[in-house]
Amino acid sequence: MVATEQFMTLPEVRRAGMRNIPREVWDYVSGGAETETTLRRNRRAMSHWVFRPRVLRDVSQIDISTTFMGMPLALPVMVAPMGSLCLVHPEGDVAMARATSRIGTIHWMSTMTASTPEEVAAAATGPLIFQLYFRGDNAWAERTFRRIEAAGFRALALTVDSAAYGRRERDIERRIDFRSHPHGLEVADDRARQASLTWKDVEWLRQATPLPLILKGIETAEDARLAVEHGVQVVYVSNHGGRQIDHAPATIESLPEIVEAVAGRAEVIVDGGFQRGTDVLKAIALGARAVCIGKAAAWGLAAAGEEGVVRTLELLALELRIAMANTGQARLADVGPALVRRACHPV
């Protein structure tokens, strides 16, 4: 399947996306907090790991399929939750849901989006996951849960790394606050509830909805252990794409200690700077079940709407297959830590 032959490489998609949307929207989507050190570190840390290619292993047939929470994935890449996608493209989350369904993967819908859960669910033919920001009291949360349960969402992801809104200086210097656009859910600007969250709220969430619970924004082994002790089914390693705290570690650097701490008691996924097939393969080797992409998916949406997102996922799949073939890996299920080592001299 080729969504559009207009784009033959991922950098082409990125450049087209930059051309198609206003600069202030591009900066909002692509920028980070303060000095953007975390943003840069996410990308640069990919070079801290190198492959140990094996040869003569029959890679004539490559299988990049996997599962996540029992749900089949055609490739180990999902689309991360992102708010304000209507700024990037008029169809926003609806286009994302259609694109991921076509490819055979999962779209994660943010609380802070202009679409309603019902609209996104109606557009999708594949699974969806809902990402929760607390923008109300527990009664508000319960009303939200009933809606996403009725719409058929498969899991709930609580974002835990957003106690305070990061200082995104590209937006601040323009005196722009993109949080003011309409939302599909009734939400308030008051972040006090989000900032007050504790592990007791995780316990409450497990009782308040039958949906499997995911914690998004785990960056340390200590919190990963607490997550599984509280019955969380998925630990989502994330630093919010470098948009919350400056000088955080790259997520691919944090991934090994978190995988070790979880010790198979939950699935581990990761986002943060994953933009190439080789990045994805490194994450799988280090113990992630799958990778979520945010900026790269938004660039595809900006480049050509639904077709641009499909093409982005197609190119990632192509790069992943080539990387697996050239490192002697026929099946994603067989990829393990022996495939990578720390680089002696990171580029």
Image: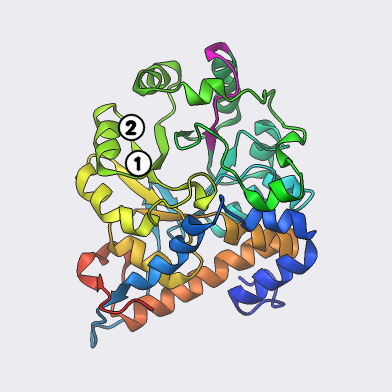
Q: Which residue does the image show at 59% across and 40% down from the upper left?
A: 109
Residue 181: % across, % down: 77, 36
Q: In this view, does 161 lie above or below 173?
A: above
Q: Is residue 58 visible?
A: yes
Q: Is residue 32 above or below residue 181?
A: below
Q: Quadrant of the N terminus?
A: bottom right
Q: Which residue does the image show at 59% across and 44% down from the upper left?
A: 167
* Residue bearing mark 1: 235
Does the stretch in magenta take in 132? yes
* Residue bearing mark 2: 232
Residue 233: % across, % down: 33, 35
- Counting the numbered discs, the total is 2
Looking at the rendered structure, the kind of residue marked 1 is Val
Whether residue 167 sits left or right of residue 43 in the image: it is right
Q: Which residue lies furthest to the bottom in this view?
A: 56
Magenta segment: 130-139
Camera-nearest residue between 64 and 247: 247
Q: What element carries label 1?
A: strand
